[in-house]
Amino acid sequence: MRKFETWLLERATVPNAHTLAVYKQLGGYHALSKVLKGEKPMSPADVVNEVKLSELRGRGGAGFSCGMKWSFMPDPQKDPRPRYLAINADESEPGTCKDRVLMEQDPHGLVEGALIACYAIRAQAAYIYVRGEYRLSYQRLQAAIDEARAANLVGKNILGTGFSCEIHMHKGAGAYICGEETGLMESLEGKRGHPRPKPPFPAAFGLWGQPTTVNNVETIFNVPFIVARGGAWHAAIGTKGSKGNFLCGVSGHVEKPGVYELPFGLTARQIIDEFAGGVWKGRKCKAWFPGGSSCALVKGEDLDVVLDHDSLKTKGSSLGTAALIVMDDQTSIARVMEIIARFYDHESCGQCSQCREGTQWLSQIFHRIATGQGQPDDVATLESLAKGMAPGKTICALSDAAAIPTLSAVRLFKDELLECVKQKRDTLPYPRVEYAGAH
Amino acid sequence: MTKITVNGRAVEADPKQPLIAACHANQADVPTYCYHPGLTPVGSCRICQVEVQQGTGPARVVVACRTYPAEGMVVQTESEKAHEVRRECLEFLLKNHPLDCPICDKAGECDLQDFTYTEGQSAGRSHEPRRPLEKRKSLGDVIVLDEERCILCSRCVRFFEEVTKKPQLTVADLGSRSTIATFADRPLTGNYQGNIADLCPVGALTLKKFRFQARVWNLVKMASTCAECSRGCSTTVEVLRGGEVKRFRPRDNPAVNQWWLCDTGRFAFEHVNAGERLDGARTRESLAAVAELLAEDPAALLVASPFCTQEEGALILGFARSRGVQAYFLSPAPNGLKDALLHTGDPCPNRRGLTELGFAPLSPAEIGSPKTLVLFGERSAELCGTALARAGRVALFDCHAAALPNVAASIGVPTHVERSGTWINIDGQRGVLGAARPAPAGVRPLTSLVPELAALLRAQAVRP
């Protein structure tokens, strides 16, 4: 077994780590006291600098530098408007299940991170937007906030330092699109979760029109560790451009699916073989998604790529939320894409023409191919449709998220798709489960 | 103002207005569906994509309705790339559009149809049946929704939110299942529903009163002014083959009504389309009869219709002054339709103009029982109501006859869609009337009849 330092899931394995008592025993809220009233209290700018130094990149899929994002918040001297932190816990990407572990097992870690982040960006309040289906996450987080408030860790004049910060919870209602940062803000405001055109960016015009930073759960969760141990410590772990540990959710055809905490620098093969128990039933890997269904498929023979932000680009894919979905050699790509395309068709908000009509069209074509009714021009149509949907042609990235896997499937598995069309059947039939709402 | 370049031309643009406004102001015909100058741009239809280059950066394709002019911006609306992305977008918009143009009321003035003709490919690539949805969903007394034709631009939704400030419509459901709907399928209310049929870039929202009434290319259109209140909204009168008026539609006028028109004005065809018009067959004899009445009673009461134009008013006033009497115009009571947006509640479209000329307002009740009453102009008998019967003898210049024994002479005049002239609205804005169709045979306007009447009286005066 590899030896490396872990922190993200360290407490999650301790019984009752979700309670304040156990959390404090494990060193909880030390980082917060260090920031607010340590020997050398840190200014908000100090915290931002420390996070910048750590080279922490957002874990929500886009991989944007967290410190940089925080520094986009306007100068409070020049812009006295109230400001907010929104924490994106609407984890709905197919394959992604990492934030759930943190929120269920270690909710105080998120609360502490939220408080430090609010302090750094001078926000008066944090809003945690929790996916509606994550009931336990919601309950545990709410309990953690209540406990923390009772212990004067949330609310007015925290720990007697004069720093005040509220943390509010919001439960999503089941829409994937509300995980998009502007859709999330609209939803938080009580409107339909329709993403807003950018610019203006959230740092200038966010929640209720006020400066807002939107961060992923895992990103915020890293903050107390960075503050406690120093940005340099974090920046020393990992590969160039990808620092620290990340939560890797491995799912699909592996023996031991699960969420693993890993340092950047491991290859997909190492992760699958050493941690996830290898591809199941002794089979070979045919294809895999490195970071959820929204990134490009990678071929099974390319498992030796390092799973980090930059290395995956050489394989035409991206890290996304580091949700590894492994497919064995008996998987039908037409069937996989049928399922994925139907997901995006179901979840498109319907604002932009390309996305509303395009996701449906992709879904219809993949369904046709997978059920042996493919037309000779279907694969070519798929490719040109996907090119018309991305990149950057719509308000948000959902259209891209549907187009990218499609393009990769056509690029890597064109022959297989064409064969399905030609033979008028799925060449790798898999037991079909018809869902309500299927075509 | 910001200096930008649109298709090679250096122009000035307002940095607060979206780039598309600058494009449209400079002959760059960028298509739009969700964008409307009177509504907040949302950038959702994505059809208005243009190529923009700034500084030393590479050219980018952006939506012109959500991009704002910046100094030195170079905009290409006709570049190969811009056309390509718009064509792609168009294909998506047409994916589920039923293409039932042959039976669609919007055909001929449909933005989607127009752009498809200029840009689209001749054959579709989709093998799927189109999305089956409700073809005729009633949204109240005014509007019918065809959900299949809808391209979800949300103009109608924003109209109620932003213009009437009473949100009534929404986009229901998600993605390709989205439809326009009211809460719990309640009917739309208010006096401004018709505007959403104009706003709709396709044939999804149609007026119940215009449904299957005419093909729009057979309509003769004339710029005019609404006659229903003293706001005097700028309109277009649309007449089918010289016959019935089929539509009144708002005409963009920033000083008066912007892009909007109330339903009262929009559907005010009853008077202009009513049959049994007074014709011009016996105009000469009738004018002689009127002249005789006036010669017998020097104190005859001269009352103009509030629909009289400035031009007609000036002649009537001159005629009254030559007889040494006050000229009046009929001023009915406010009709209770006043609202915060356009309707003033005052049914006299030229009240301000006639008052400024020197007319005095006269309510029907104030007419009393004059020995001789002369009414000038359209709908004057109708507006007098019961007062008409109390007059001794009546000479009537109107569009329709009044079947009363005391009406001694009736002479036909054109309605406001059959004559040209000027009204002055409540704020002093001039509104022009245009003749959208000819008046019935022989019917002459008051501008011709009043001078002839004056000449007849002068001739009588010199007769021994």
Image (tube, grey):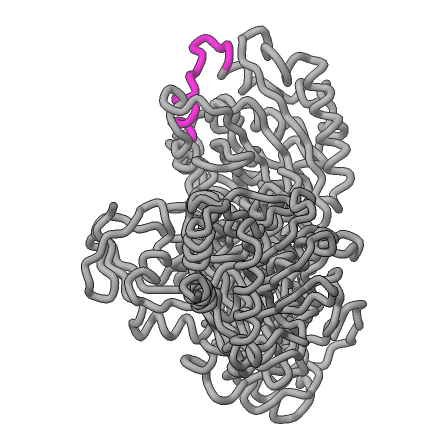
Q: Is residue A312 above or below residue B369?
A: below
Residue at horizontal 46 percent and vertical 56 percent from the top:
B316
Give the number of marks: 0
Check the picture and name the quadrant holding the N terminus of chain B: top left
Q: Is residue A16 above or below residue B195?
A: above
Residue at horizontal 39 percent and vertical 29 percent from the top:
A74
In-front residue for pair B286/A243: B286
Q: Is residue A108 above or below residue A204?
A: above
Question: Magenta segment range?
Answer: A36-51
Residue A399 drawn at (x, y percent): 53, 62
Residue at horizontal 64 percent and vertical 83 percent from the top:
B103
In-front residue for pair B28/B454: B454
Q: On the rendered structure, is A299 left or right of A99? A: left
Residue B432 drawn at (x, y percent): 43, 60
Report the magenta stretch's main SS. helix
Residue A210 drawn at (x, y percent): 50, 31
In-front residue for pair B59/B31: B31
Check the picture and name the quadrant holding the C terminus of chain B: bottom left
Residue B385 drawn at (x, y percent): 71, 54
Residue at horizontal 54 percent and vertical 47 percent from the top:
B328
Q: Is residue B166 above or below residue B9?
A: above
Please, which residue is most extreme toward the top here? A160
Whether residue A254 can be seen here? yes
| Residue A227 falls within the magenta-colored stretch | no
Whether residue A282 can be seen here? no
